[in-house]
């Protein structure tokens, strides 16, 4: 085993260790994770919320026992593979050992530590962007057409994970046109590789077509409820924070791509980031959508700085360059990870507020960062629903209807009664069982809507009561009520079907 390989294995080992150490046991899974895990029970070529790749990973996790270890393992794995690809990119650019260590350190001590904590499509999205940029680098270096087919395959897998990767193409196409690499459009191989990519994503496109393209409704809903609160200046500011310890390296890559002769043929990467960020700004995208751009630029910057710092007194700056990402990570460690108790965060709220970490998607400040609040109260909710269920007559004819996918997913994950909660929200709209004639409903409602739900639904049942609620005041679901309706006076299946049809027609 070579020295380089040993060091690379060390970085990957530290990566996995940190991912498991940065999460306090006081926190549970995050809202989105429950939905993604539940997709393993409903495999399909598409979902209202995301493309199908995440469900395939969820199915593997299910086969492995659905333990927290494996849920956290896969995003950590995708982060480790991102480090590996940056390492290989540095080798392709003829970087020395210092460049390799610098690049790996920059990727390791970055926002990816936070991103890779959660089982969401974002970790694989960053990996897909990094891999596709690496493949482009390989194609430019070798002019071997096989890399076009590899790139089309990687793009397709990335597309089946998250449609966000389309922005990579939006930035890349004009970059090819304004450089000498425009000649690629004259190669028949390019179009054959595009056909391969289209064939790979075709099942998902067919699913979208058969379901009236819910992705467009999802994007519209996202724009109306979340992206409307996005500030373009904040978007740009947060780009600096994501890789704060690597800014010098990334900025060095921009200079090198324009003026460093060995990188002359890679100049299209400079234009690509400009066009891609412009597209993100135009569409008012969330700041983290752009994270996948940067790892490849860390590779370019690391190689260039290794060249700059190789001689004379400058070589003594090499340890400093490696230390900077680690030193700047220390203050980030104190605020960006759920490694502090909710009580501690509330007591030191100014440290979080000044960085904008308490601002949620609604544009308002709250007690905890949104991701942290979304990691509390779920087990309490599930166990209280279990308790309410056990007290019911005719238990088997009970519908558990939730307001949102987080509630339904958490109940299904933690239940001890093998319950199957559903919702008119997200993917659950396709997972109702309408073969049963329901006599009871357990209605899980957000706090502000509990009274309205009681008044609206009670006339259709003999009995109704507010059985319990979520009492964790730090949880985003604080106050969520568990309402029990028993003795249905009508067959509620038609009302459920009407609601589903209304939602789908709207989609």
Image (spheres, rainbow, N blue to C red):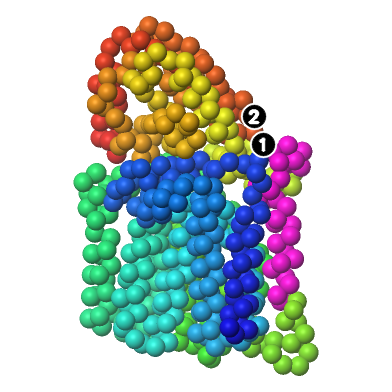
The main secondary structure of the magenta stretch is helix
Residue matched to label 1? 367
Q: Position of residue 133 (x, y in %)?
A: 44, 73
Residue at the extreme bottom of the image, as rendered? 312
Relative placement, left or right, of 147 versus 412 is: left
Q: Nearer the viewer, residue 346 or 57?
A: 57
The N terminus appears in which quarter of the rendering?
bottom right
Pick the residue in front: 364 or 7: 7
Q: Can you identify the residue that label 2 sits on?
A: 473
Q: Residues within 10 Å of mark 2 (few under 14, many from 20)?
A: some
Q: Is residue 400 above or below residue 356?
A: above
Provide residue 41's location: percent of width, then percent of height: 35, 43
399 to 140, vertically: above or below: above
Is residue 46 shown in magenta? no
Asked if residue 346 shows in the view, the reply is no
On screen, residue 208 above or below 414: below
Counting from the top left corner in percent of width and height, residue 184 is at 31, 82
Is 333 covered by the magenta stretch? yes
Instruction: State the SS at label 2.
Output: loop
Q: Secondary structure at mark 1?
A: loop
Q: Nearer the viewer, residue 471 or 413?
A: 413
Where are the magenta residues, as a range? 321-349
Q: Residue at x 72, y 64 (%)?
A: 328
Q: Earlier in the sequence, mark 2 or mark 1?
A: 1
> Looking at the picture, how far across and down is residue 125, in whole percent?
45, 60
Q: Are marks 2 and 1 in contact (CB under 8 Å)?
A: yes
Q: Is residue 437 left or right of residue 471?
A: left
Q: Residue at x 33, y 43 (%)?
A: 42
Residue at 32% x, 77% y: name it.
Answer: 148
The residues tagged by marks 2 and 1 sit, at their Cα atoms, a distance apart of 9 Å
């Amino acid at each position: 085993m070579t020295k380089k390989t040993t060091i690379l294995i060390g970085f990957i080992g530290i990566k996995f260790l940190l991912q498991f150490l940065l999460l306090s046991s006081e926190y549970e899974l995050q809202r989105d994770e429950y939905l993604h895990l539940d997709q393993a029970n409903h495999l399909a070529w598409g979902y209202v919320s995301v493309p199908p790749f995440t469900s395939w990973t969820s199915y593997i996790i299910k086969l492995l026992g659905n333990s927290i270890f494996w849920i956290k393992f896969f995003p950590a794995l995708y982060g480790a593979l991102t480090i590996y690809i940056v390492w290989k990119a540095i080798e392709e650019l003829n970087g020395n050992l210092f460049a390799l260590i610098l690049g790996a350190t920059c990727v390791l001590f970055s926002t990816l530590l936070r991103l890779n904590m959660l089982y969401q499509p974002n970790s694989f999205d960053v990996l897909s962007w990094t891999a596709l940029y690496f493949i482009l680098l390989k194609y430019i270096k070798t002019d071997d057409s096989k890399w076009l087919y590899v790139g089309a395959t990687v793009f397709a897998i990335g597309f089946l994970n998250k449609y966000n990767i389309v922005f990579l193409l939006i930035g890349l196409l004009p970059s090819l046109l304004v450089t000498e690499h425009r000649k690629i459009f004259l190669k028949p191989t390019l179009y054959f590789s595009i056909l391969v990519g289209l064939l790979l994503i075709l099942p998902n496109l067919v699913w979208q077509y058969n379901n009236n393209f819910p992705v467009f409704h999802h994007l519209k809903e996202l724009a109306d409820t979340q992206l409307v609160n996005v500030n373009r200046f904040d978007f740009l500011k947060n780009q600096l924070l994501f890789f704060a310890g690597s800014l010098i390296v990334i900025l060095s890559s921009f200079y090198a791509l324009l003026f460093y002769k060995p990188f002359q043929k890679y100049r299209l990467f400079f234009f690509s980031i400009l066009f891609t960020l412009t597209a993100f700004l135009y569409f008012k995208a969330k700041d983290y959508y752009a994270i996948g751009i940067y790892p490849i630029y860390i590779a370019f910057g690391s190689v260039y700085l290794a060249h700059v710092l190789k001689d004379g007194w400058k070589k003594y700056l090499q340890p400093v360059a490696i230390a900077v990402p680690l030193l700047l990570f220390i203050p980030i460690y104190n605020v960006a990870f759920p490694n502090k108790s909710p009580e501690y965060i509330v007591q030191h709220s100014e440290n979080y507020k000044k960085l904008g970490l308490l601002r949620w998607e609604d544009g308002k400040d709250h007690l905890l960062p949104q991701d942290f609040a979304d990691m509390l109260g779920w087990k309490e909710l599930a166990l209280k629903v279990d308790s309410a269920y056990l007290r019911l007559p005719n238990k088997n004819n009970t519908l558990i209807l939730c307001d949102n996918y987080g509630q339904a997913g958490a109940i299904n994950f933690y239940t001890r009664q093998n319950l199957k909660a559903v919702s008119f929200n997200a993917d659950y709209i396709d997972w109702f069982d309408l073969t049963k004639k329901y006599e009871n409903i357990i209605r899980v409602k957000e706090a502000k809507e509990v009274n309205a739900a009681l008044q609206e639904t009670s006339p259709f049942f003999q009995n109704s009561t507010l059985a319990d609620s979520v009492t964790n005041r730090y949880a985003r679901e604080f106050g969520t009520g568990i309402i029990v309706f028993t003795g249905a006076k009508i067959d509620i299946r038609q009302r459920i079907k009407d609601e589903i049809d209304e939602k789908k027609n709207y989609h």
